[in-house]
Image (cartoon, rainbow, N blue to C red):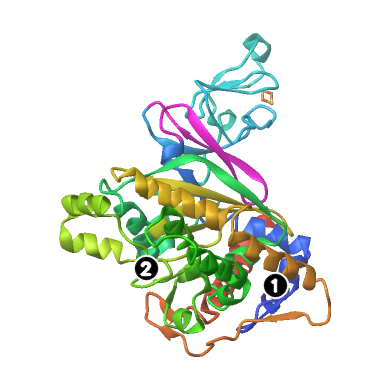
Amino acid sequence: MKYSNEQLAQLIEPTRVHRKVYLDPDIFDMEMERIWGSAWIYIGHESQVKTPGEYATATMGNKVPVIMVRDKDSKIHVLHNRCGHKGAKLVDQASGKVSAFRCCYHGWTYRIDGKLVGVPNMPGYEGTGFDKSDPQYSMQKVAQYDSYRGFVFATLDPTAPKLTTWMGAGMAECLDNLCDRSPEGEVEVIGKPMRYVHDCNWKMFTENLNDGMHPMVVHQGVVDAALQYMKTVPEDSAERSEAEIIPPFGASYEHFESTDLFAYQYGHHYDGGRTSIHAAYSVPNDYEQLMIAAYGQKKTREILTFNSHNTMYYPSLTTKTAVQNIRVVRPISVNKTIIESWSFRLKGAPDNMLKRTILYSRLINSSFGMVGPDDLTAYYRMQNGLESNGSDWIEMHRHYGRDEDKGDYIHGLLTGDLDIRTQYKAWKDYMTREQLAQEVA
Ligand code: FES
Ligand SMILES: [Fe+2]
């Protein structure tokens, strides 16, 4: 390894980060092994694989290909996407359905739960000591996998804490809220994701999620345009309610200053809760009635007034509970990242709710949207600007020393840098863990 643990630790100070963490391909490789190979990584949602044999692929750690698949008993597994013979990747598509996995090279076949069942021309193995039933030749299970409310995560680290421990009650509450917004308490994926290539380091995206100091600057142009446009269309028109999604992205410093930020262990955090930029969205009456029928008046209020804006399950998943969108971080290289946006349907809710979700995704998250591309421009400029050795450090001082430690979490304000300091605390912990450093050396 190019960096010792001591050298890695020196890159992160309480209020400063060295620019190398965004630029150096060796650090990127170490992050993939030590963070992405150790944390719980979001693989996909159970509704992507509804019936036995349906699968979806993902990558964990340093380019480790995996498959999420539903077996014949409806159980979901996360398996290494690797043939037990000479190692060929078994499936090469993002998703599909199979009755068995058959390797493209020599035709070994596996049951959908990964067990090796077929080896062509077996007599050649007689007397060689090869045992087809030896589990080492089957598809291997990833060290740990589990799901929470239908969201499937896996880790390559057998010593990692349980998923619910890693997530913690505060972060679980955000996924609960996303699902509880369905009168049936469940969500399901709609269609395929939008995949949006970001020419920047993955951390520029994760550090933007709870950055309350940028919207009024970077999104000013589109907010001004939306406000002008809204003056030209009738109050109760569909165009007006679509355009209304945009202005909250240009809310004032005072607004973001009064929005809470909650930071947890393992680099997780979210902003909002009882208030957020989504708090003023109207609730359609037909939907509200279905919710009240399912949960009662009081609980419905509780669910619909909990508005976390961006919730970061560090490092791979970020959710927007109030609009049922998630974005998944898939790092490609030190300066290239794919962001996948998935939209969810609230089971049992009227179609207008799904329309709003898709509209939000299209207007805000997509590569041809009106908000996400503003942010991407800033990330790209940072990636470029940091090549300058004019200074080696990036600062994250805002509100340092004012965050309140509440035991289970740290409370701050959205205009502070608590979110970034939280991510770098986890970064340093993962990157310099003694035991892990020896295992991957
Ligand atoms: S590598 Fe898969 S069957 Fe040979
Ligand atoms: Fe933004």
Q: Are marks 2 and 1 in contact (CB under 8 Å)?
A: no
- Residue 392 in percent (x, y) is at 77, 80
Note whether 239 is above or below 50 in the view shown.
Answer: below
Q: Amino acid at mark 1?
A: Leu
Foreground disc of the pair 2, 1: 2
The quadrant in which residue 280 appears is bottom left
Q: Amino acid at mark 2?
A: Ala
> According to the image, label 1 marks what residue?
8
> According to the image, label 2 marks what residue?
279
In the picture, the disc for residue 148 is none
- Residue 68 belongs to the span the image colors magenta: yes
Note whether 201 is above or below 115 in the view shown.
Answer: below
In terms of image quarters, where does ligand 1 lie?
A: top right
How crowded is the residue under tag 2: few (<14 C-alpha within 10 Å), some, or many (20+)?
some
Question: Is 400 placed left or right of 260 in the picture?
Answer: right
- Residue 30 in percent (x, y) is at 69, 60
> Which one is in front, 325 or 117?
325
Task: Provide the residue span drawn in magenta.
Answer: 49-72
**Which residue is rendered at x = 26% and y = 45% of the image?**
184
- Residue 232 in percent (x, y) is at 50, 63
